Amino acid sequence: MGALDTAILPTAADIDAAAQRLFGVAVRTPLVNAPVLDAALGARVFLKAETLQRTGSFKFRGAYNKVSSIPLARRGAGVVAYSSGNHAQGVAAAARLLGMRATIVMPSDAPRAKRARTLALGAEVVAYDRNSEDRAAIAARLVAERGATLVPPYDDALIIAGQGTIGREIVEDLARLGLAPEIVVIGASGGGLAAGISLGVKARVPQAKFYTVEPEGFDDTLRSFASGKREANARMSGSICDALMSNTPGELTFPITQALIGQGLTASDAEVARAVRYAFEELKLVVEPGGAIGLAALLAGKLDVTGKVVVGVLSGGNVDADLFARLIT
Amino acid sequence: MGALDTAILPTAADIDAAAQRLFGVAVRTPLVNAPVLDAALGARVFLKAETLQRTGSFKFRGAYNKVSSIPLARRGAGVVAYSSGNHAQGVAAAARLLGMRATIVMPSDAPRAKRARTLALGAEVVAYDRNSEDRAAIAARLVAERGATLVPPYDDALIIAGQGTIGREIVEDLARLGLAPEIVVIGASGGGLAAGISLGVKARVPQAKFYTVEPEGFDDTLRSFASGKREANARMSGSICDALMSNTPGELTFPITQALIGQGLTASDAEVARAVRYAFEELKLVVEPGGAIGLAALLAGKLDVTGKVVVGVLSGGNVDADLFARLIT
């Protein structure tokens, strides 16, 4: 793992500690099995429905694990995060539950619904202009001025460990059915979800295989696996998967996903749209495009899963009603 | 229970037997808890997501319990049912799993999607004209000609017992959380779901209270509770809840719901539409109007549930994409 200080990388024990913190606070989301999907793929397919998590995405897990770990003496100064979407809501909800102030730096052109949901969770929203301002600099200034704690979207051991509780639950729920995950398919952007889940699953099922899935044209993780170093995307927008627009794998997440996953897939916008529609028609679940990319890869036959126990993660459901209506009709 | 032969009424033991038959075949649907809904209602609210059941509604449970109970010698002749929607799919799926032929008598103006889904499940569809033909007579003729078995939509002990497995699962899943249901809210039409669930829950939690919920203007169950006899609706169409258009409570279901429930609520089309939208925005679940009527009554404050353990049943999610798009935007 190169020059990286491995002491700051999360471990399976950190995931167990996160599970303790999240118990009774995060929703223990169901691992959904749909016979119609099993038949379509010729496999036993389970979907971890993080769409049903607090705030409508997995992001609450990492955020709460991080925010609840802030020492009491520092809580009065609140937390700061930057995000245009799901992380914003996760941090806002976590801070509210802990009676803390949350300030979210959001682009001025963020989807109105996501801004409204963040405000409704009691957060202060600081708008910035994507073209002329640097969100990290704005957040750093707020942190310095207030003595607040920054809650990063993925490059943080506590955030990764929080997302890792998903992996732990997948293994536990399958064990109750006498099963173990053979293939796990995870959407990737900054890599917090993929790093956390692969850590959480591998700790108990070492032989499990993982695949990241990224939007076509935004396959920085896939190219980083190939080159062995963190590659960047050429663009920062232009995919239907607004939740998967990080520029490059994280400094902390990449050594983990490289070691534990090391292989990836992509899905086109059309394949993602088909998965959103399939989830509506056949599964009766509302999934946002970025949250459906794993299912998209499976439905598009990007992987031969015949006869396997396959897990996909439906990572979020915060989709604008107009877009959803367009995708399903 | 008047002149009714109580020997044909289902019992808690019949529900246990149904649970055995359905094990590993029906989906054990999750009992969804959403903190946002708890906060909105000031209660602990759990939603039994039968939207995630095989065929997208609870109807599969009763249908499979009935069809799998047909003696082997009679299976070759197949099954016959009449339905314009969810029961059709439930019967078709059950018959296919058991290698049997299914014939469904459907109105010629049934929603195309429901007809297509029934055909896709391998059933033969016999169309009839709502205005000039009698579907029960057509089904009776098919039964007589073929020696087939009729699978009624609700007035059958095995059908009621199958739906009753939902009540059993609700009690089991809440017990794991150290809870018991205090109030259970169930959409009612023919009454198979309400009869089954109230039987299944009461067997283990005698103090639980139940409410049926019906569309405004189609409150035959409510009026039957008041008068003590089976009342009929003035109309057979005109509500957004196409799944709740039975004319009158069932001959078998009514004595059960009268004895175990005895009280009901109604919800307007606007309240149901709001619940469908709420399920999309906040719960990320696709629910059809008839399946959302219990949630609609809760969200509309028809009942004071403050501080209670409340269960609603999301009974189905087979909603046309165009209608759903209209309801959420």
Image (cartoon, coloured by chain):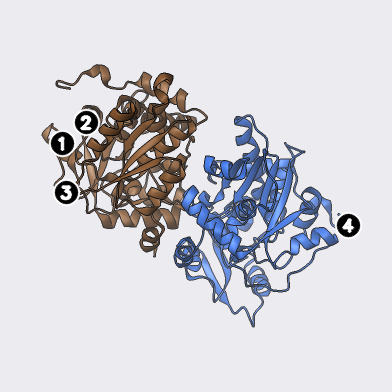
Chain colours: A brown, B blue
Looking at the rendered structure, whether the residues under marks 4 and 3 are on a common chain is answered as no
Chain letter of disc 3 in the image: A
Q: Is residue A135 above or below residue B77?
A: above
Determine the residue located farthest toward the bottom in the rendered image.
B132
B214, B4: nearer the viewer: B214
B70, B13: nearer the viewer: B13
Density class for disc 1 (Cα within 10 Å; few <14, some 14-19, many ≥20) is: some
For label 1, the residue is: A224
Q: Amino acid at mark 3?
A: Arg
Determine the residue located farthest toward the left in the rendered image.
A227
- The answer to whether the residue labelled 1 contacts the one labelled 2, judged by CB atoms less than 8 Å apart, is yes
Closer to viewer: mark 4 or mark 1: 1
Question: Which of pointers 1 and 3 lies earlier in the amino acid sequence?
Answer: 1
SS assignment at label 2: helix
SS assignment at label 3: loop
For label 4, the residue is: B2
In the image, which disc is placed on residue A254?
2
Chain letter of disc 2 in the image: A
Question: Which of pointers 1 and 2 lies earlier in the amino acid sequence?
Answer: 1
For label 3, the residue is: A235
The quarter of the displayed image where residue A324 is located: bottom left
